[in-house]
Image (cartoon, helix red, strand yellow):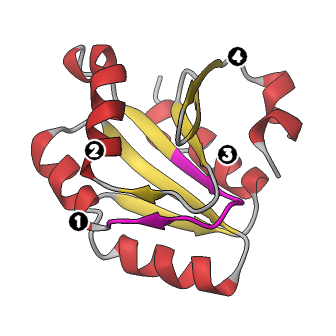
């Protein structure tokens, strides 16, 4: 399910940004990506995203990340290591998988991400988990 088809698109304020390789949504608590079919997410795409979202990074905003993988695409897991070494923006990540193969890939990526990374079987599960992280619910 795409984010804009979910109940959350009507419940959560968001900003939508379209790139040639996919669409990103920014909410108060998380970025959500929907990458196009067949794309290989590599350092060039990562650099474009870091450049576009640099105002969050520079301000030290702590935010979650949801990868809504309803399309089949590849992701260089080394990007997690590089991002973790260079930036400290993400407090956690959720990867929504729709196939067993995608779930296995997410399991591999989990080994490269040094924060909490949850593999989810639905967009609802990922967003609920993200919204209920203690970092967002401290008084």
Q: Is residue 121 left or right of residue 18?
A: right
Q: Are marks 4 and 3 in contact (CB under 8 Å)?
A: no
Residue for point 59% across, 79% down:
103
Distance in Å between CA atoms under marks 3 and 1: 25 Å
Label 3, on which residue?
127
Distance in Å between CA atoms under marks 1 and 4: 32 Å
Residue 67 disc label: none
Going from N to C along the chain, the mark reached first, 2 or 1, is 2
Going from N to C along the chain, the mark reached first, 1 or 4, is 4
Residue for point 86% across, 23% down:
10
Q: Of circles 2 and 1, which is in front?
A: 2
Label 4, on which residue?
13
**Does residue 17 lie above or below 81 as drawn?**
above
Label 2, on which residue?
44
Q: Which stretch appears magenta?
A: 66-76
Label 1, on which residue?
78
């Amino acid at each position: 399910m795409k984010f804009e088809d979910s109940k959350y698109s009507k419940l959560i304020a968001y900003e939508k940004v379209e790139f040639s390789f996919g669409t990103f949504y920014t909410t108060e608590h998380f970025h959500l990506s929907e990458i196009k079919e067949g794309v290989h997410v590599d350092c060039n795409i990562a650099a474009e995203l870091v450049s576009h979202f640099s105002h969050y990074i520079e301000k030290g905003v702590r935010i979650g990340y949801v990868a809504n993988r309803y399309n089949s695409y590849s992701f260089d897991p080394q990007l997690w290591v590089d991002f973790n070494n260079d930036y400290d923006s993400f407090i956690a990540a959720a990867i929504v998988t729709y196939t067993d193969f995608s779930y296995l890939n997410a399991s591999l990526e989990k080994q490269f991400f040094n924060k909490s990374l949850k593999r989810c079987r639905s967009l609802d599960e990922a967003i609920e988990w993200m919204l209920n992280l203690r970092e967002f619910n401290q008084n």
